[in-house]
Image (cartoon, rainbow, N blue to C red):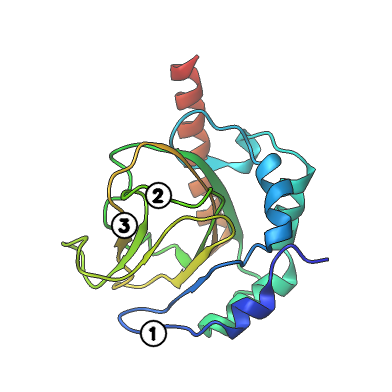
Amino acid sequence: MSLLDLNAFADTPLVIDPFDYTVVPGFLRAESVVPVRRDFPVIPYPGLMPLAETQFGPGFAALIEELRSPEVTTAFSEKFGIDLSGRPLMITVRGRCQPKDGRIHTDTESKLVTGLLYLNDPWEADGGRLRLLRGPDDLEDMIAEVPPNNGTLVAFRRGERSFHGHKPYEGVRRYIMFNWMTDTRVAAREIARHRISARLKRWTAA
């Protein structure tokens, strides 16, 4: 059975103002959360990690395989009105948050569509809740705030107005980020950058 609820994704409305986004609680089915959480990579330091720099179990691997499937690409293509078939999919993971994370940004132009799939217990902290924003200057000027709870998806089409960020938080904050990229060369360059950063963090922590 599919780990992801693509029907719920298709049925959830797309918000188009001030940019295209959707929020889908339960995108990762409730019965799938336990094996995915159990096999999530152990990441003791902050920062985005390429999958190749992590170790994970079969439950997590099954989710990654499904995210890479043509069915998921088709679903996101239809939702956002952009043909993502043939576009490289970059997947990174994060296990911890540091206070400087969450600064307002729009993502780089090399990212066409971004998905954030959260894997945390019910979120009680004030910080670390993703805010989708009207502009680049004020975290309080938000159109939505999303707690990073188990199985919740935030997805948006990158644009000049796709501002997002969150209030500071320090501690465990798990998610998978997947991005359809403009081309393979750019994706490889981004992965290489994250790989170097991951290795520097590992060496520093040793």
Q: Is residue 52 left or right of residue 130?
A: right
Q: Residue type at mark 2: give it.
A: Glu
> Label 1's element?
loop
Q: Relative to residue 74, is residue 176 depicted above or below?
A: above
Counting residues from the start of the chain, the first of labels 3 and 2 encountered is 2
The residue drawn where x is 36% and y is 49% is: 128
Q: Label 2 to label 1, Cα distance in Å?
A: 29 Å
Q: How many marks?
A: 3
> Which quadrant holds residue 133?
bottom left
Counting residues from the start of the chain, the first of labels 2 and 1 encountered is 1
> Which quadrant holds residue 40?
top right
Residue 68 seen: no
Counting residues from the start of the chain, the first of labels 3 and 1 encountered is 1
**Local crowd size for mark 1, using a 10 Å CA cut-off: few (<14), some (14–19), many (≥20):** few
Q: Label 3 to label 1, Cα distance in Å?
A: 18 Å
Q: Which residue is mark 1?
A: 16
The residue drawn where x is 31% and y is 54% is: 166
Q: Are marks 2 and 1 in contact (CB under 8 Å)?
A: no
- Image position, residue 102 (x, y; %): 32, 50
> Label 3's element?
strand
> Label 2's element?
loop
**Local crowd size for mark 3, using a 10 Å CA cut-off: few (<14), some (14–19), many (≥20):** many
Q: Which residue is mark 2?
A: 124
- Image position, residue 106 (x, y; %): 33, 63
Residue 27 seen: yes
- Image position, residue 114 (x, y; %): 49, 64
Q: Nearer the viewer, mark 3 or mark 2?
A: 2
Q: Which residue is mark 3?
A: 165
> Which quadrant holds residue 87?
bottom right
Q: Is residue 22 left or right of residue 161?
A: right
